[in-house]
Image (cartoon, coloured by chain):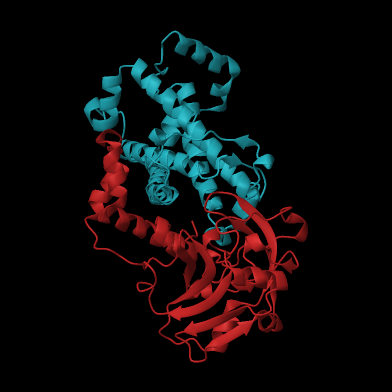
Amino acid sequence: MTRIARRSLLTRMAVLGTGAFAASGCSKIDSFATSEAGESLFDRAEDWHRTAHRTLAGRQSLAPEYAPEDRSPSFKGNGSLTVDSPVYREQLAKGFPDWRISVKGLVDNPLRLSLADLKALPQRTQITRHDCVEGWSAIGEWTGPQLSMLLDNAKVREEANFIVFWCADVLYGRRYYESVDMVDAYHPQTIIAHSLNGEPIPEKNGAPLRMRIERQLGYKHAKYLTGIEAVAKLDDIAEGKGGFWEDIGNYQWYAGI
Amino acid sequence: MTPRENPRHSISTRLWHWVNAGALVVLFMSGLGISNAHRYLYWGNYGFDPADAWLAVIRFPNWATLPQRYNLAEARDWHSAGAWVFALALLGMWIAMLVNRHFALDIAAPISAWSPSHLWAEVKAHLKGRFEAEDGAKYNILQKLTYGIVLGVLLPLMVFTGLAISPGFEPAAPWLVDALGGRQSARSLHFIAAFALFAFFVVHIVMVLLSNPVKQMWAMIAGGKQ
Protein backbone atom coordinates (compact mmCIF):
# COMPACT_ATOMS: atom_id res chain seq x y z
CA MET A 1 0.00 0.00 0.00
CA THR A 2 1.01 3.59 0.10
CA ARG A 3 4.32 3.91 1.81
CA ILE A 4 5.42 7.10 3.43
CA ALA A 5 9.05 8.06 3.95
CA ARG A 6 10.49 5.91 6.70
CA ARG A 7 12.57 7.01 9.61
CA SER A 8 15.00 4.96 11.58
CA LEU A 9 13.49 1.57 12.28
CA LEU A 10 15.57 1.31 15.41
CA THR A 11 13.99 4.39 16.92
CA ARG A 12 10.58 2.97 16.38
CA MET A 13 11.45 -0.48 17.66
CA ALA A 14 12.90 1.15 20.73
CA VAL A 15 9.65 2.99 21.35
CA LEU A 16 7.74 -0.26 21.03
CA GLY A 17 10.10 -2.56 22.77
CA THR A 18 11.47 -0.83 25.79
CA GLY A 19 8.29 -0.08 27.60
CA ALA A 20 9.66 3.38 28.21
CA PHE A 21 6.43 4.70 26.79
CA ALA A 22 4.68 3.86 30.03
CA ALA A 23 6.47 6.79 31.59
CA SER A 24 6.56 8.98 28.52
CA GLY A 25 2.99 10.18 28.66
CA CYS A 26 0.11 8.73 26.79
CA SER A 27 -0.60 11.75 24.64
CA LYS A 28 2.83 11.25 23.09
CA ILE A 29 1.95 7.66 22.34
CA ASP A 30 -1.30 8.72 20.76
CA SER A 31 0.48 11.19 18.53
CA PHE A 32 3.17 8.62 17.67
CA ALA A 33 0.51 6.36 16.19
CA THR A 34 -0.66 9.06 13.79
CA SER A 35 2.82 10.38 12.98
CA GLU A 36 4.57 9.41 9.77
CA ALA A 37 6.95 7.17 11.65
CA GLY A 38 4.10 5.45 13.43
CA GLU A 39 2.04 4.88 10.31
CA SER A 40 5.07 3.61 8.48
CA LEU A 41 5.87 1.15 11.28
CA PHE A 42 2.29 -0.09 11.33
CA ASP A 43 2.23 -0.45 7.53
CA ARG A 44 5.40 -2.47 7.68
CA ALA A 45 4.06 -4.75 10.42
CA GLU A 46 0.93 -5.27 8.29
CA ASP A 47 3.11 -6.18 5.28
CA TRP A 48 5.05 -8.69 7.36
CA HIS A 49 1.84 -10.35 8.48
CA ARG A 50 0.59 -10.61 4.90
CA THR A 51 3.91 -11.98 3.66
CA ALA A 52 4.10 -14.44 6.55
CA HIS A 53 0.53 -15.64 5.96
CA ARG A 54 1.08 -16.21 2.27
CA THR A 55 4.49 -17.81 2.77
CA LEU A 56 3.28 -20.19 5.46
CA ALA A 57 -0.08 -21.05 3.95
CA GLY A 58 0.52 -20.56 0.23
CA ARG A 59 -1.19 -18.01 -1.96
CA GLN A 60 -4.06 -20.25 -3.03
CA SER A 61 -4.64 -22.05 0.27
CA LEU A 62 -8.29 -22.31 1.25
CA ALA A 63 -10.09 -20.92 4.25
CA PRO A 64 -11.80 -23.72 6.19
CA GLU A 65 -15.19 -24.82 4.93
CA TYR A 66 -17.83 -26.19 7.25
CA ALA A 67 -20.65 -28.71 7.18
CA PRO A 68 -24.27 -27.48 6.87
CA GLU A 69 -24.93 -28.23 10.55
CA ASP A 70 -22.06 -25.96 11.59
CA ARG A 71 -23.81 -22.85 10.27
CA SER A 72 -24.86 -20.20 12.76
CA PRO A 73 -28.63 -19.98 13.26
CA SER A 74 -28.65 -16.51 11.72
CA PHE A 75 -26.19 -14.17 10.04
CA LYS A 76 -25.54 -10.81 11.64
CA GLY A 77 -25.77 -7.70 9.48
CA ASN A 78 -23.33 -4.90 10.24
CA GLY A 79 -22.19 -1.58 8.75
CA SER A 80 -24.61 -0.59 6.01
CA LEU A 81 -27.84 -2.52 6.50
CA THR A 82 -29.57 -1.17 3.42
CA VAL A 83 -29.15 1.15 0.48
CA ASP A 84 -31.09 4.33 1.05
CA SER A 85 -32.45 5.02 -2.42
CA PRO A 86 -35.86 4.62 -4.12
CA VAL A 87 -34.29 2.65 -6.97
CA TYR A 88 -32.83 0.15 -4.54
CA ARG A 89 -36.14 -0.23 -2.69
CA GLU A 90 -37.95 -0.83 -5.94
CA GLN A 91 -35.38 -3.38 -7.14
CA LEU A 92 -35.38 -5.12 -3.77
CA ALA A 93 -39.17 -5.49 -3.91
CA LYS A 94 -39.03 -6.91 -7.45
CA GLY A 95 -36.07 -9.26 -6.94
CA PHE A 96 -33.46 -7.07 -8.66
CA PRO A 97 -34.50 -7.68 -12.32
CA ASP A 98 -32.63 -4.59 -13.52
CA TRP A 99 -29.56 -4.81 -11.25
CA ARG A 100 -26.35 -4.82 -13.28
CA ILE A 101 -22.71 -5.05 -12.35
CA SER A 102 -20.00 -3.75 -14.60
CA VAL A 103 -16.55 -5.24 -15.01
CA LYS A 104 -14.38 -2.38 -16.19
CA GLY A 105 -11.07 -0.55 -15.88
CA LEU A 106 -7.92 -2.24 -17.18
CA VAL A 107 -9.79 -4.89 -19.16
CA ASP A 108 -9.94 -5.56 -22.91
CA ASN A 109 -13.52 -6.77 -22.80
CA PRO A 110 -15.69 -4.75 -20.39
CA LEU A 111 -18.77 -6.60 -19.15
CA ARG A 112 -22.19 -5.67 -17.90
CA LEU A 113 -23.94 -8.53 -16.16
CA SER A 114 -27.36 -9.16 -14.69
CA LEU A 115 -28.11 -11.54 -11.84
CA ALA A 116 -29.29 -14.06 -14.41
CA ASP A 117 -25.96 -13.74 -16.26
CA LEU A 118 -24.05 -14.41 -13.05
CA LYS A 119 -26.24 -17.38 -12.16
CA ALA A 120 -25.69 -18.85 -15.64
CA LEU A 121 -21.95 -19.13 -14.97
CA PRO A 122 -20.47 -22.17 -13.16
CA GLN A 123 -21.22 -21.74 -9.46
CA ARG A 124 -19.23 -22.32 -6.30
CA THR A 125 -20.96 -23.01 -2.99
CA GLN A 126 -18.96 -22.69 0.21
CA ILE A 127 -19.84 -22.74 3.90
CA THR A 128 -17.39 -20.36 5.48
CA ARG A 129 -16.87 -18.38 8.63
CA HIS A 130 -17.23 -14.62 8.49
CA ASP A 131 -14.99 -12.81 10.97
CA CYS A 132 -15.81 -9.20 11.74
CA VAL A 133 -13.05 -6.76 12.66
CA GLU A 134 -15.00 -6.20 15.89
CA GLY A 135 -14.34 -9.79 16.94
CA TRP A 136 -17.54 -11.75 16.30
CA SER A 137 -18.00 -14.59 13.80
CA ALA A 138 -20.93 -16.07 11.86
CA ILE A 139 -21.01 -19.10 9.57
CA GLY A 140 -23.07 -19.25 6.39
CA GLU A 141 -23.32 -20.91 2.99
CA TRP A 142 -22.56 -18.64 0.05
CA THR A 143 -23.13 -19.35 -3.64
CA GLY A 144 -21.95 -17.51 -6.73
CA PRO A 145 -19.45 -17.51 -9.60
CA GLN A 146 -15.75 -17.15 -8.94
CA LEU A 147 -14.37 -13.67 -9.51
CA SER A 148 -11.49 -15.22 -11.49
CA MET A 149 -13.98 -16.34 -14.12
CA LEU A 150 -15.31 -12.82 -14.61
CA LEU A 151 -11.81 -11.41 -14.74
CA ASP A 152 -10.80 -13.97 -17.36
CA ASN A 153 -13.93 -13.25 -19.41
CA ALA A 154 -13.21 -9.53 -19.23
CA LYS A 155 -9.56 -10.14 -20.20
CA VAL A 156 -7.83 -8.23 -17.45
CA ARG A 157 -4.66 -6.57 -18.67
CA GLU A 158 -1.19 -7.32 -17.36
CA GLU A 159 -0.79 -3.90 -15.76
CA ALA A 160 -3.70 -4.42 -13.36
CA ASN A 161 -2.51 -4.87 -9.77
CA PHE A 162 -5.72 -4.47 -7.81
CA ILE A 163 -9.42 -5.21 -8.17
CA VAL A 164 -11.74 -2.55 -6.78
CA PHE A 165 -15.29 -3.39 -5.71
CA TRP A 166 -17.84 -0.60 -6.07
CA CYS A 167 -20.98 -0.64 -3.96
CA ALA A 168 -24.39 1.02 -3.92
CA ASP A 169 -24.41 1.83 -0.21
CA VAL A 170 -23.46 5.20 1.18
CA LEU A 171 -22.16 5.60 4.73
CA TYR A 172 -21.31 8.93 6.35
CA GLY A 173 -21.91 10.58 2.99
CA ARG A 174 -19.41 8.40 1.14
CA ARG A 175 -19.81 5.56 -1.26
CA TYR A 176 -18.58 2.22 0.02
CA TYR A 177 -15.82 0.51 -1.90
CA GLU A 178 -13.12 -2.04 -1.23
CA SER A 179 -10.12 -3.55 -3.00
CA VAL A 180 -7.91 -6.63 -3.04
CA ASP A 181 -4.71 -7.54 -4.82
CA MET A 182 -4.56 -10.10 -7.61
CA VAL A 183 -3.70 -12.95 -5.23
CA ASP A 184 -7.02 -12.62 -3.44
CA ALA A 185 -8.88 -11.65 -6.64
CA TYR A 186 -7.92 -14.97 -8.25
CA HIS A 187 -8.32 -17.02 -5.06
CA PRO A 188 -10.71 -19.95 -5.66
CA GLN A 189 -12.98 -18.93 -2.77
CA THR A 190 -13.31 -15.33 -3.93
CA ILE A 191 -16.84 -15.40 -5.31
CA ILE A 192 -19.58 -12.93 -6.15
CA ALA A 193 -22.28 -14.34 -3.93
CA HIS A 194 -25.96 -14.00 -4.77
CA SER A 195 -27.24 -16.52 -2.22
CA LEU A 196 -26.83 -17.01 1.52
CA ASN A 197 -27.93 -20.35 2.95
CA GLY A 198 -29.72 -21.20 -0.29
CA GLU A 199 -31.84 -18.03 -0.37
CA PRO A 200 -31.26 -14.70 -2.11
CA ILE A 201 -28.93 -12.62 0.09
CA PRO A 202 -31.00 -10.69 2.67
CA GLU A 203 -31.02 -6.90 2.54
CA LYS A 204 -28.91 -6.49 5.68
CA ASN A 205 -26.24 -8.86 4.33
CA GLY A 206 -25.78 -7.03 1.00
CA ALA A 207 -28.60 -7.92 -1.44
CA PRO A 208 -28.39 -8.69 -4.25
CA LEU A 209 -24.63 -9.29 -4.57
CA ARG A 210 -21.82 -9.47 -2.09
CA MET A 211 -18.12 -10.25 -2.46
CA ARG A 212 -16.63 -13.10 -0.43
CA ILE A 213 -12.93 -12.61 0.37
CA GLU A 214 -12.67 -15.56 2.71
CA ARG A 215 -9.18 -15.07 4.16
CA GLN A 216 -9.86 -11.51 5.27
CA LEU A 217 -12.12 -9.72 7.75
CA GLY A 218 -15.71 -8.73 7.03
CA TYR A 219 -15.17 -5.16 5.88
CA LYS A 220 -13.39 -6.45 2.77
CA HIS A 221 -16.54 -8.36 1.73
CA ALA A 222 -18.17 -5.52 -0.19
CA LYS A 223 -21.99 -5.57 -0.14
CA TYR A 224 -24.60 -4.18 -2.59
CA LEU A 225 -22.07 -4.71 -5.40
CA THR A 226 -22.43 -2.59 -8.56
CA GLY A 227 -19.02 -2.66 -10.17
CA ILE A 228 -15.70 -4.47 -10.42
CA GLU A 229 -12.78 -2.40 -11.66
CA ALA A 230 -9.24 -3.49 -12.49
CA VAL A 231 -6.70 -0.79 -11.65
CA ALA A 232 -2.93 -0.40 -11.57
CA LYS A 233 -2.87 1.55 -8.31
CA LEU A 234 -5.27 2.67 -5.61
CA ASP A 235 -3.86 6.14 -4.96
CA ASP A 236 -6.30 7.95 -7.24
CA ILE A 237 -9.42 6.33 -5.84
CA ALA A 238 -11.28 8.22 -3.12
CA GLU A 239 -8.63 8.97 -0.50
CA GLY A 240 -6.23 6.41 -1.86
CA LYS A 241 -6.14 3.87 0.94
CA GLY A 242 -8.02 1.17 -0.93
CA GLY A 243 -11.34 1.07 0.86
CA PHE A 244 -14.08 2.92 2.68
CA TRP A 245 -12.97 2.03 6.21
CA GLU A 246 -9.32 2.36 5.22
CA ASP A 247 -10.02 5.93 4.10
CA ILE A 248 -12.39 7.00 6.82
CA GLY A 249 -10.92 5.22 9.82
CA ASN A 250 -7.40 4.16 8.86
CA TYR A 251 -8.35 0.49 8.93
CA GLN A 252 -5.74 -1.98 7.70
CA TRP A 253 -5.93 -2.57 3.93
CA TYR A 254 -4.71 -6.14 4.47
CA ALA A 255 -7.43 -7.47 6.74
CA GLY A 256 -6.08 -10.99 7.22
CA ILE A 257 -4.99 -10.29 10.80
CA MET B 1 34.14 -19.11 38.58
CA THR B 2 34.02 -15.95 40.65
CA PRO B 3 30.67 -14.31 41.35
CA ARG B 4 31.61 -11.35 39.19
CA GLU B 5 31.78 -13.56 36.12
CA ASN B 6 28.53 -15.29 36.94
CA PRO B 7 25.74 -12.73 36.79
CA ARG B 8 22.45 -13.56 38.44
CA HIS B 9 20.57 -12.83 35.22
CA SER B 10 22.15 -13.55 31.85
CA ILE B 11 22.12 -10.89 29.15
CA SER B 12 19.48 -12.80 27.15
CA THR B 13 17.17 -12.96 30.17
CA ARG B 14 17.56 -9.27 30.93
CA LEU B 15 17.11 -8.16 27.34
CA TRP B 16 14.05 -10.35 26.86
CA HIS B 17 12.56 -9.32 30.19
CA TRP B 18 12.38 -5.65 29.25
CA VAL B 19 11.48 -6.11 25.60
CA ASN B 20 8.75 -8.50 26.68
CA ALA B 21 7.53 -6.14 29.41
CA GLY B 22 7.21 -3.30 26.91
CA ALA B 23 5.53 -5.48 24.31
CA LEU B 24 3.08 -6.89 26.85
CA VAL B 25 2.03 -3.44 28.04
CA VAL B 26 1.40 -2.38 24.43
CA LEU B 27 -0.43 -5.62 23.64
CA PHE B 28 -2.52 -5.64 26.80
CA MET B 29 -3.64 -2.02 26.56
CA SER B 30 -4.35 -2.19 22.83
CA GLY B 31 -6.09 -5.51 23.47
CA LEU B 32 -8.43 -3.84 25.96
CA GLY B 33 -9.23 -1.30 23.25
CA ILE B 34 -9.96 -4.11 20.77
CA SER B 35 -12.16 -5.85 23.34
CA ASN B 36 -14.31 -2.73 23.55
CA ALA B 37 -15.33 -3.23 19.91
CA HIS B 38 -17.35 -6.32 20.79
CA ARG B 39 -17.42 -7.00 24.50
CA TYR B 40 -18.79 -10.54 24.39
CA LEU B 41 -16.97 -13.85 24.47
CA TYR B 42 -18.22 -17.14 23.05
CA TRP B 43 -17.23 -20.80 22.79
CA GLY B 44 -17.10 -22.63 19.49
CA ASN B 45 -16.52 -21.36 15.98
CA TYR B 46 -19.15 -18.67 15.67
CA GLY B 47 -20.68 -16.14 18.05
CA PHE B 48 -22.17 -12.70 17.53
CA ASP B 49 -25.30 -12.56 19.67
CA PRO B 50 -24.67 -11.25 23.21
CA ALA B 51 -27.40 -13.66 24.35
CA ASP B 52 -25.06 -16.55 23.48
CA ALA B 53 -22.01 -15.11 25.23
CA TRP B 54 -20.45 -16.90 28.21
CA LEU B 55 -19.03 -13.59 29.37
CA ALA B 56 -20.04 -9.98 28.89
CA VAL B 57 -16.80 -8.10 29.41
CA ILE B 58 -16.82 -4.63 30.98
CA ARG B 59 -16.16 -1.65 28.78
CA PHE B 60 -12.57 -0.77 29.56
CA PRO B 61 -12.10 2.92 30.34
CA ASN B 62 -10.04 5.08 28.00
CA TRP B 63 -7.15 5.45 30.45
CA ALA B 64 -6.61 1.68 30.29
CA THR B 65 -6.54 1.40 26.51
CA LEU B 66 -4.08 2.16 23.75
CA PRO B 67 -4.82 4.58 22.19
CA GLN B 68 -6.40 6.52 25.05
CA ARG B 69 -9.76 6.76 23.28
CA TYR B 70 -11.89 4.34 21.35
CA ASN B 71 -10.17 3.72 18.02
CA LEU B 72 -10.31 0.12 16.84
CA ALA B 73 -8.09 0.63 13.79
CA GLU B 74 -5.30 2.22 15.81
CA ALA B 75 -5.58 -0.33 18.62
CA ARG B 76 -5.27 -3.09 16.00
CA ASP B 77 -2.22 -1.34 14.52
CA TRP B 78 -0.50 -1.34 17.90
CA HIS B 79 -1.57 -4.91 18.53
CA SER B 80 -0.35 -6.38 15.26
CA ALA B 81 2.95 -4.49 15.39
CA GLY B 82 3.53 -5.40 19.06
CA ALA B 83 2.73 -9.03 18.32
CA TRP B 84 5.85 -9.34 16.15
CA VAL B 85 8.10 -8.01 18.91
CA PHE B 86 6.43 -10.20 21.52
CA ALA B 87 6.39 -13.45 19.53
CA LEU B 88 9.91 -13.19 18.11
CA ALA B 89 11.34 -12.18 21.50
CA LEU B 90 9.61 -15.15 23.13
CA LEU B 91 11.02 -17.48 20.50
CA GLY B 92 14.48 -16.00 21.07
CA MET B 93 14.12 -16.35 24.84
CA TRP B 94 13.13 -20.01 24.56
CA ILE B 95 16.11 -20.75 22.32
CA ALA B 96 18.42 -18.89 24.72
CA MET B 97 16.95 -20.64 27.78
CA LEU B 98 17.48 -24.05 26.25
CA VAL B 99 20.96 -23.25 24.99
CA ASN B 100 22.27 -21.60 28.18
CA ARG B 101 20.35 -24.14 30.28
CA HIS B 102 18.55 -21.42 32.27
CA PHE B 103 15.39 -23.49 31.90
CA ALA B 104 16.95 -26.81 32.90
CA LEU B 105 19.03 -25.40 35.76
CA ASP B 106 16.77 -22.73 37.26
CA ILE B 107 13.16 -23.30 36.26
CA ALA B 108 12.59 -27.02 35.73
CA ALA B 109 11.78 -28.78 38.99
CA PRO B 110 12.09 -32.53 39.70
CA ILE B 111 8.86 -34.39 40.34
CA SER B 112 9.84 -34.78 44.01
CA ALA B 113 9.64 -31.00 44.43
CA TRP B 114 6.01 -30.97 43.34
CA SER B 115 4.66 -32.63 46.50
CA PRO B 116 1.77 -30.76 48.13
CA SER B 117 3.63 -30.67 51.43
CA HIS B 118 6.63 -28.99 49.79
CA LEU B 119 4.43 -26.47 47.99
CA TRP B 120 2.52 -25.75 51.21
CA ALA B 121 5.74 -25.28 53.16
CA GLU B 122 6.84 -22.75 50.54
CA VAL B 123 3.51 -20.91 50.69
CA LYS B 124 3.88 -20.66 54.49
CA ALA B 125 7.43 -19.36 54.10
CA HIS B 126 6.14 -16.72 51.65
CA LEU B 127 3.42 -15.67 54.07
CA LYS B 128 6.12 -15.12 56.69
CA GLY B 129 8.01 -12.95 54.23
CA ARG B 130 10.76 -15.48 53.41
CA PHE B 131 11.20 -15.68 49.64
CA GLU B 132 14.72 -17.08 49.38
CA ALA B 133 15.32 -20.25 47.41
CA GLU B 134 16.74 -23.23 49.26
CA ASP B 135 20.03 -25.01 48.62
CA GLY B 136 21.56 -22.16 46.66
CA ALA B 137 19.04 -22.53 43.83
CA LYS B 138 18.04 -19.41 41.96
CA TYR B 139 14.31 -19.84 42.44
CA ASN B 140 12.12 -21.52 45.03
CA ILE B 141 9.47 -24.01 43.96
CA LEU B 142 6.68 -21.42 43.75
CA GLN B 143 8.82 -19.26 41.50
CA LYS B 144 9.77 -22.22 39.34
CA LEU B 145 6.14 -23.19 39.02
CA THR B 146 5.04 -19.66 38.21
CA TYR B 147 7.81 -18.91 35.72
CA GLY B 148 7.29 -22.33 34.17
CA ILE B 149 3.58 -21.68 33.68
CA VAL B 150 4.18 -18.17 32.35
CA LEU B 151 6.98 -19.12 29.94
CA GLY B 152 5.72 -22.56 29.02
CA VAL B 153 1.96 -22.10 28.95
CA LEU B 154 0.58 -18.56 29.13
CA LEU B 155 2.98 -16.69 26.84
CA PRO B 156 2.96 -19.36 24.10
CA LEU B 157 -0.82 -19.60 24.46
CA MET B 158 -1.05 -15.87 23.73
CA VAL B 159 0.88 -16.44 20.49
CA PHE B 160 -1.08 -19.50 19.40
CA THR B 161 -4.54 -18.16 20.28
CA GLY B 162 -3.60 -14.87 18.63
CA LEU B 163 -2.59 -16.66 15.43
CA ALA B 164 -5.77 -18.74 15.55
CA ILE B 165 -7.95 -15.61 15.55
CA SER B 166 -6.32 -14.37 12.33
CA PRO B 167 -8.30 -15.41 9.23
CA GLY B 168 -5.24 -14.91 7.01
CA PHE B 169 -3.08 -17.22 9.12
CA GLU B 170 -5.72 -19.90 9.55
CA PRO B 171 -5.20 -21.63 6.15
CA ALA B 172 -1.58 -22.27 7.23
CA ALA B 173 -2.69 -24.26 10.28
CA PRO B 174 -6.43 -24.94 10.38
CA TRP B 175 -5.71 -27.70 12.92
CA LEU B 176 -4.65 -25.01 15.39
CA VAL B 177 -8.09 -23.41 15.36
CA ASP B 178 -9.71 -26.85 15.68
CA ALA B 179 -7.40 -27.81 18.56
CA LEU B 180 -8.40 -24.66 20.42
CA GLY B 181 -12.08 -25.45 19.95
CA GLY B 182 -12.90 -23.00 17.16
CA ARG B 183 -12.24 -19.36 16.43
CA GLN B 184 -14.42 -17.88 19.13
CA SER B 185 -12.98 -20.33 21.68
CA ALA B 186 -9.50 -19.22 20.64
CA ARG B 187 -10.60 -15.62 21.15
CA SER B 188 -11.96 -16.47 24.62
CA LEU B 189 -8.74 -18.29 25.55
CA HIS B 190 -6.72 -15.30 24.29
CA PHE B 191 -8.68 -13.11 26.69
CA ILE B 192 -8.37 -15.53 29.62
CA ALA B 193 -4.62 -16.01 29.14
CA ALA B 194 -4.16 -12.22 28.88
CA PHE B 195 -5.81 -11.71 32.25
CA ALA B 196 -3.87 -14.62 33.77
CA LEU B 197 -0.72 -12.78 32.64
CA PHE B 198 -2.06 -9.56 34.10
CA ALA B 199 -2.56 -11.37 37.43
CA PHE B 200 1.02 -12.64 37.19
CA PHE B 201 2.19 -9.09 36.45
CA VAL B 202 0.49 -7.76 39.60
CA VAL B 203 1.89 -10.51 41.85
CA HIS B 204 5.32 -10.17 40.21
CA ILE B 205 5.44 -6.43 40.96
CA VAL B 206 4.23 -6.97 44.54
CA MET B 207 6.88 -9.64 45.15
CA VAL B 208 9.64 -7.42 43.78
CA LEU B 209 8.49 -4.59 46.02
CA LEU B 210 8.49 -6.93 49.04
CA SER B 211 11.99 -8.28 48.41
CA ASN B 212 14.52 -5.51 48.06
CA PRO B 213 13.13 -3.79 44.94
CA VAL B 214 16.22 -1.69 44.18
CA LYS B 215 18.51 -4.71 44.17
CA GLN B 216 16.00 -6.73 42.16
CA MET B 217 15.54 -4.01 39.56
CA TRP B 218 19.26 -3.46 39.26
CA ALA B 219 19.84 -7.20 38.87
CA MET B 220 17.37 -7.30 35.97
CA ILE B 221 19.11 -4.31 34.35
CA ALA B 222 22.81 -4.83 34.98
CA GLY B 223 22.83 -8.52 35.81
CA GLY B 224 23.64 -8.38 39.52
CA LYS B 225 25.76 -10.91 41.32
CA GLN B 226 25.07 -14.45 42.32
Q: Residue at x 44, y 65 (%)?
A: A243
Q: Position of residue A19 (x, y in %)?
A: 31, 38
In the displayed structure, would residue A88 be above or below residue B68? below
Quarter the N terminus of chain B occupies: top left
Q: Position of residue B63 (x, y in %)?
A: 38, 33
Which is more toward the observer, A196 or B93?
A: A196
Q: Residue furthest bottom?
A: A108
Give the residue at the far top of this rendering. B128
Q: Which chain appears cyan?
A: B
**What colour has chain A?**
red
Residue A189 appearing in the image: no
- Tell me which residue sits at (31%, 56%) in the image: A39
Observer-nearest of A219 and A46? A219
Q: Is residue B216 visible?
A: yes
Q: Which percent across, then down, holds residue B101?
A: 40, 37
Q: Is residue B56 left or right of residue A195?
A: left
Total labels drawn: 0
- Compared with A98, B58 (above or below) is above
B155 to A67, vertically: above or below: above
Asked if residue A218 lies left or right of residue A235, the reply is right
Q: Is residue A137 above or below residue B202?
A: below
- Residue sitting at x 43%, y 35%: B103
Residue B146 at x, y = what percent?
Answer: 48, 28
